[in-house]
Amino acid sequence: MTFRHLKDLLEETDGNLGAHLKKLEDAGYLSVDKKYYKRKPVSWYSLTGIGRGALEKHLDALGRIVKEVEESTTGE
């Protein structure tokens, strides 16, 4: 996904998104491929294998939290 697409999707500023992406890249969760399109630089970001595993683990944990909250509010 391009930086621009992520920025629009997440409604973040360039600086804020760039800082977050850099941390994820430094942690090995993302890889970046910088290319040019019509003479303009474009950064493409991809999840690494480690990043995909971490994301799946995180989403699983969030799912358990949601389930716990739902069960506690329905009395189950």
Image: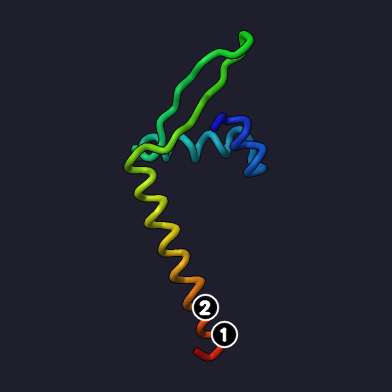
Instruction: Please say which color scheme the image uses.
Output: rainbow
- The residues tagged by marks 1 and 2 sit, at their Cα atoms, a distance apart of 6 Å
The answer to whether the residue labelled 1 contacts the one labelled 2, judged by CB atoms less than 8 Å apart, is yes
Crowding at mark 2 (Cα within 10 Å: few <14, some 14-19, many 20+): few
- Quarter in which the N terminus is drawn: top right
- Point out the residue furthest to the bottom here: 75
Residue 7's image quarter?
A: top right
Q: Residue at x 51, y 71 (%)?
A: 66
Amino acid on which disc 1 is placed: Thr
Left or right: residue 38 versus residue 72 is right
Q: Residue at x 32, y 43 (%)?
A: 50
Amino acid on which disc 2 is placed: Val
| Circle 1: element type | helix
| Residue 17 position in % (x across, y down) | 56, 38
76 in relation to 24, above or below:
below
Q: Residue at x 57, y 87 (%)?
A: 74
User: Total number of numbered labels?
Assistant: 2
Q: Which residue is mark 1?
A: 73
Residue 26's image quarter?
A: top left
Q: Residue at x 41, y 57 (%)?
A: 58
Left or right: residue 53 versus residue 20 is left
Left or right: residue 49 versus residue 38 is left
Crowding at mark 1 (Cα within 10 Å: few <14, some 14-19, many 20+): few
| Residue 24 position in % (x across, y down) | 42, 40
| Circle 2: element type | helix
The residue lying toward the viewer, choosing from 14 and 34, is: 34
Q: Which residue is mark 2?
A: 69
Q: Which of the numbered marks, if any, corresponds to residue 5? A: none
| Residue 38 position in % (x across, y down) | 63, 10
| Residue 8 position in % (x across, y down) | 67, 37
